[in-house]
Image: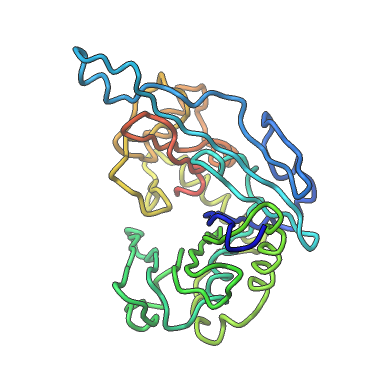
Amino acid sequence: MSSSTKKTHALAIYLIKEFAQSEQEILKGGLESRITDVGTFYSQNASFTKPPVWKNLFPNLDLNHLFSASASGLFLMTVENRFFALTFGPASRHFFRNGVIEERFGLITTLNSIHPNSLKSVDTKTLESEGIQTRIQSARPVTTDEFGLDVEKDLVRCVVGESKIDALGKILYGKDYLRVSVKCDLTDLKEIMKTALEQYQKPDYKVEFGWIDNLKEIQDGKKILELNEKLVKEINEASPEKLWLTIPEILDWTDHGGFRYSNNKKEAIMDDIHISSFKEWLKNSGKTVVELNDLEDNSIFRFSTSNQFTKDAWRIYECI
């Protein structure tokens, strides 16, 4: 198929860490799989069609023909001896096992692939007592200086800019995953992944965006273990100090229906999340002491206003 007749597809691309060498190490169980020549497509064996919640506001109207639907899938493939995953739909990100995603893959790939003066949006988290998250957008492409970032305090989580790599499209969105919009079909995916991997492995970003490494996540396993022990000790105090739960991303509040600590639709929806309410939820489940696996294995689920489908979910550990 010629490139002129191919459709444009928005792709959310994840790079899997090298230690994960099998599909079983990467993905949770209970997924249906369908094999292609390029990779394997995974989906949940579940129905996602239901009436919208707001229909209950109009009990005297016959609105039984209205339904909302949400489907999710994940495509797993290998390129250059590395696993890549493409996610589709709101629940697909949660098909992954904990800790298998290459952090900052999308961020570094984007910084290596955009023009230095072409930034359109930056998401930051300020490492102050309140942990403020900010999204700065520009009406026109600008340099980092014009965003007024504090390189000593601002942890950059996401950048959007104009691509200089034709194979990755015109606009790149980078955080842990890379989002591109390109004309392609299934046979083009390996070349796109190969290009993304090549861009990720370059050190070019250090010239114009070297300050991005001033603040980044700790990778040292011994130090992480030490900090996790301190975290668990503190969270089990009657009144934990300087600890709070917060969603680790900037939310779109236009379709926000609330939170739960499980995907159980019978549980009440909460307006906000707190360390104390999570500990109370665990206590009601029979847990009197919080352990590290409780933070890793449990999630905060966010639901839509319109149909109460799960819009997002984050591990408790990510939200501390």
Quarter holding residue 192: bottom right
Q: Residue at x 69, y 54 (%)?
A: 84
Work out whether 186 lies above or below 195.
above
Work out whether 83 lies above or below 317.
below
- Color scheme of the displayed model: rainbow
Quarter holding residue 68: top left
All told, the count of numbered labels is 0
Q: Residue at x 55, y 87 (%)?
A: 207
Please tell me which residue lies in front, 114 or 148.
114
Work out whether 289 lies above or below 163.
above
Work out whether 290 lies above or below 19.
above
Q: Residue at x 51, y 62 (%)?
A: 175
The picture places residue 196, in percent across and down from the top left corner, at 64, 67
Quarter holding residue 301: top left
The picture places residue 20, in percent across and down from the top left corner, at 75, 51
Quadrant holding the N terminus: bottom right
Q: Residue at x 49, y 70 (%)?
A: 170
In the displayed structure, does residue 258 sit left or right of residue 185? left
In the displayed structure, does residue 268 sit left or right of residue 217? left
The picture places residue 299, in percent across and down from the top left corner, at 50, 37
The picture places residue 34, in percent across and down from the top left corner, at 73, 36
**Residue placed farthest to the bottom in the image?**
207
